[in-house]
Image: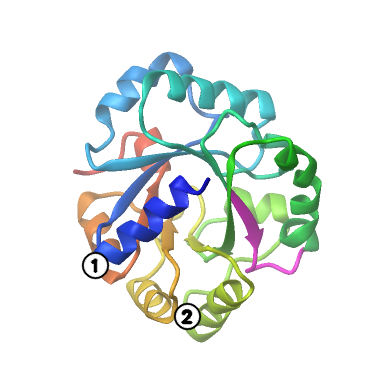
């Protein structure tokens, strides 16, 4: 089945923008689930669950809770193979295209195969590009790779296209958790024009105005995490 990915592509064809809220299992208190669900935007279409250093137990606990209290699709956004749980609806099968560390380009993916073979979860191959957000992110620290400079737009476009040409079904531009600066309008616009597959953008988006601007630039799916965790999102 490919219900989640089909929803992404159908929305792109219709020009319908989608919003995912990212929950980091390490930072989320399950006791706050209902309060959290009540405060996220009504336009939210998906819940993403994952973090750079979360455990499988933490991830599975949060997935189960949101499956219990929400009808929104729950999509795994794993930091490594150990976080995979069959309890979610889908998995972003991430390859870190922006770095030169084979551990996060292919090795973690190989380690995940056994779990995925035994799973009924939808798997969505995703090219993940870490873009410099002005602060050292958890992804940079854990993967031991450097983010791509925001002014190197040509390289970012070519890297995103390399993901598409390699058969990835999504491209994810990420400024990193706690980013001071989100991915620039010029990058989003340029990459979205180059791609034929859905584009996800996340990191450093703190207001409804910025959210709409990112959508306007061509993002098909926007992911917001830290701004809701820290109650700093401005509607």
Name which residue lies at 33% across and 63% down. 12
**Res. 72 image quadrant:** top left
Q: As drawn, is 230 to the left or to the right of 102? A: left
Name which residue lies at 29% across and 41% down. 44
Q: As drawn, is 155 to the left or to the right of 184? A: right
x, y percentage for residue 229?
40, 34
Q: CA distance from mark 2 to mark 1?
A: 20 Å
Q: Is residue 19 magenta?
A: no
**Res. 91 image quadrant:** top right
Disc 2 is placed on an element classified as loop
x, y percentage for residue 137?
57, 52
Residue 178 appears in the picture as rendered? no
- Give the residues in magenta: 92-101
Q: As drawn, is 165 to the left or to the right of 104? A: left
- Using the image, tell me which numbered label, if any, was put on residue 216: 1
Name which residue lies at 74% across and 52% down. 109
For disc 2, the marked residue is 151
């Amino acid at each position: 089945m490919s219900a989640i990915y089909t929803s992404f592509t159908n929305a792109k064809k219709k020009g319908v923008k989608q919003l995912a809220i990212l929950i980091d299992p390490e930072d989320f208190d399950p006791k706050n689930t209902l309060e959290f669900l009540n405060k996220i935007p009504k336009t939210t279409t998906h819940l993403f669950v994952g973090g750079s250093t979360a455990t499988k137990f933490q991830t599975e606990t949060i997935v189960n809770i949101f499956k219990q209290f929400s009808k929104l699709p729950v999509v795994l956004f794993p930091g490594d193979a150990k976080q995979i749980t069959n309890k979610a609806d889908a998995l972003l099968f991430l390859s870190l295209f922006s770095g030169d560390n084979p551990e996060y380009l292919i090795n973690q993916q190989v380690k995940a195969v056994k779990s995925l073979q035994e799973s009924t979860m939808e798997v969505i191959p995703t090219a993940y590009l870490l873009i410099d957000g002005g602060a050292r992110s958890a992804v940079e620290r854990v993967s031991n790779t450097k983010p791509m400079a925001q002014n190197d737009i040509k390289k970012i476009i070519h890297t995103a296209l390399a993901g598409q040409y390699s058969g990835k079904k999504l491209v994810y531009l990420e400024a990193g958790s706690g980013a001071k600066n989100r991915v620039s309008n010029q990058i989003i616009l340029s990459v979205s024009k180059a791609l034929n597959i859905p584009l996800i953008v996340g990191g450093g988006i703190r207001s409804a105005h910025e959210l709409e601007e990112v959508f306007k630039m061509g993002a098909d799916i926007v992911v917001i995490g830290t701004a809701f965790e820290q109650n700093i999102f401005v509607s």
